[in-house]
Image (cartoon, rainbow, N blue to C red):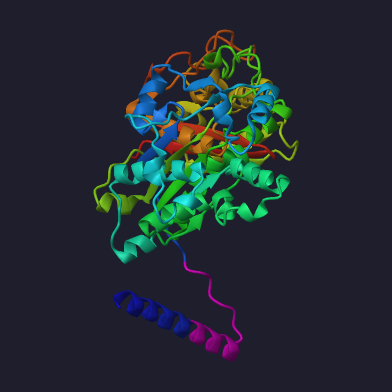
């Protein structure tokens, strides 16, 4: 009853406002006044949650990351999720894949393992693909970390969700196509469409907690996680929400996804017998990325709102830069102009100078061209600051592979933790650095304890989409 009364009051106010504006404008023919001005609202990070190939949970993942451990292993036939096909077809498909390594989330009931059964409730379980389960798990950890489980209606209305994905549930599409081939289309699940829609991750999170603020899902290939976080920050800055649950999720370890990237010649193929050496960003012997899966979710909050409730603050999100390469469907321009533009715009928005950035978490995926171009962009933009050795940088994909739509969010969390804990994580498997590097300008080969006041996180995607997030210690 109270909620109905509140909604009626809001409707009445809106009708009164419309009537007043219509009456005044029709009688005087004067233009409308400018829209209300929203004062600058600062955005901070108050909660973190993640599911990665290093384990389920922020603490498990971070501890293994900085120790230099790897979450990459050899693929098995069962990993391809081809249960609807006969054994011969499964074996033939597996043999045809040129890349047989992946960053797979460890599943089970032990601490640090992902237990999918916990996230498949009786009401919505059949409509949830794994990428949705990953998002629910990471969001739950982030919300508990932020101590933000609102019960008041006004608080729920000012809390939104912005969780995107790269390619959703290709496995479900493969299974559905098999039903067509077998002329068994009547067996198609009524939940087929809800299982494959990217925005259903955000939808399920909002339904679980009753969040009625903005409900948003970016789909920008491998920049998705970063764009979802940046977009959410702007929703807070603009006054659409006080709190946003933001990030990216992906569960693309399946036959068709891997085959597609193999055909693009994007995946590593030289290290099938030594999986933990396969992802080697910035190393001369890199030959492609290692496909991975997981989710990363942040709780973003308006600064005064966070202070008022005594929330723990990890860092401030000060800058969000975007750009387009306008060059090629999968390859960046060799001069790194797109990366430079995105990073420059994040810096400009943040009010922080180039030489005040202490750490960069690079997008570098372990592809021959992409890593070299990003290194050139960092070198060009940060110039003397980079060449002096004062700027630390690394790619954490050496440990977890490339999580596609979740990569930007998971790596944003690594960047935030680097600031919060004063440790810059290493790049794994650099035994023969790319010639672009020199003594002072070199990616971290070991995790480094250092004061980090400001840090950038890069995320780039197919189609030439680029995003950069700049986080800083709260002043």
Residue 45 can be seen in this image = no
Q: Residue at x 56, y 77 (%)?
A: 32
Residue 252 spot, x, y in % from top left: 57, 36
Q: In the rendered view of the protein, which quadrant contains the C terminus?
A: top left
Range shown magenta = 18-36
Q: Residue furthest left?
A: 310
Q: Quadrant of residue 142?
A: top left
Q: In the rendered view of the protein, which quadrant contains the N terminus?
A: bottom left
Please tell me how many numbered marks the rendered image carries.
0
Q: Quadrant of residue 318?
A: top left
Can you say whether 438 is above or below 299 in the image?
above
Q: Nearer the viewer, residue 64 or 82?
A: 82
Q: Residue furthest right?
A: 327
Residue 320 spot, x, y in % from top left: 52, 43
Q: Is residue 371 magenta?
A: no
Left or right, 243 with respect to 333, comes to left
Residue 108 can be seen in this image = yes
Left or right, 218 with respect to 243, comes to right
Q: Residue at x 38, y 37 (%)?
A: 115
Q: Residue at x 41, y 83 (%)?
A: 12
Can you say whether 199 is above or below 175 in the image?
below
Can you say whether 3 is above or below 193 in the image?
below
Can you say whether 1 is above or below 356 in the image?
below
Residue 361 spot, x, y in % from top left: 50, 28
Q: Is residue 19 magenta?
A: yes
Residue 150 spot, x, y in % from top left: 30, 57
Left or right, 320 with respect to 471, comes to right
């Amino acid at each position: 009853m109270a909620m109905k009364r509140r909604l009626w009051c809001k409707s009445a106010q809106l009708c009164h406002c419309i009537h007043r504006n219509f009456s005044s404008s029709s009688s005087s023919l004067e233009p409308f006044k400018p829209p209300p001005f929203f004062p600058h609202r600062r955005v901070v990070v108050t909660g973190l949650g993640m599911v990665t190939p290093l384990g389920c949970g922020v603490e498990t993942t971070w501890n293994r990351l900085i120790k230099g451990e790897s979450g990459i292993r050899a693929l098995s036939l069962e990993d391809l999720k081809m249960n609807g096909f006969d054994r011969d077809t499964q074996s033939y498909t597996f043999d045809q894949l040129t890349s047989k390594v992946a960053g797979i989330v460890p599943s089970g009931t032990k601490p640090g393992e992902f237990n999918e059964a916990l996230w498949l409730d009786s009401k919505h379980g059949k409509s949830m693909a794994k990428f949705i389960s990953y998002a629910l798990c990471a969001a739950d950890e982030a919300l508990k970390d932020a101590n933000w489980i609102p019960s008041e209606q006004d608080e729920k209305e000012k809390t939104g969700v912005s969780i995107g994905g790269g390619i959703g549930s290709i496995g479900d599409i493969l299974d559905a196509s098999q039903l067509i081939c077998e002329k068994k289309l009547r067996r198609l699940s009524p939940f087929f469409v809800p299982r494959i829609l990217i925005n259903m991750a955000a939808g399920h999170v909002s339904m679980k907690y009753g969040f009625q603020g903005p409900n948003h899902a970016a789909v920008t290939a491998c920049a998705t996680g970063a764009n979802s976080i940046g977009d959410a920050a702007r929703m807070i800055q603009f006054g659409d929400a006080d709190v946003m649950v933001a990030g990216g999720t992906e569960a693309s370890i399946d036959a068709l996804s891997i085959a597609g990237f193999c055909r693009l010649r994007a995946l590593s193929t030289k290290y099938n017998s030594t999986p933990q050496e396969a992802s080697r960003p910035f190393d001369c012997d890199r030959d492609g990325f290692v496909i991975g899966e997981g989710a990363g979710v942040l709780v973003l909050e308006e600064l005064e709102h966070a202070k008022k409730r005594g929330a723990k603050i990890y860092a401030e999100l000060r800058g969000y830069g975007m750009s387009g390469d306008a060059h090629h469907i999968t390859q960046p321009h060799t001069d790194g102009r797109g990366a430079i533009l995105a990073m420059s715009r994040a810096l400009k928005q943040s009010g922080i100078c180039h030489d005040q950035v202490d750490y960069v978490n690079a997008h570098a995926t372990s592809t021959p061209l992409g890593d070299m171009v990003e290194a050139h962009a960092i070198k060009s933009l940060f110039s003397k600051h980079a060449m002096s050795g004062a700027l630390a940088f690394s790619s954490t994909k050496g440990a977890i592979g490339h999580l596609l739509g979740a990569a930007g969010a998971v790596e944003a969390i690594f960047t935030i933790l680097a600031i919060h804990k004063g440790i810059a994580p290493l790049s794994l498997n650099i035994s023969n650095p790319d010639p672009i590097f020199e003594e002072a300008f070199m990616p971290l080969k070991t995790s480094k304890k250092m004061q980090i006041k400001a840090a950038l996180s890069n995320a780039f995607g197919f189609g030439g989409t680029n995003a950069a997030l700049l986080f800083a210690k709260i002043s």
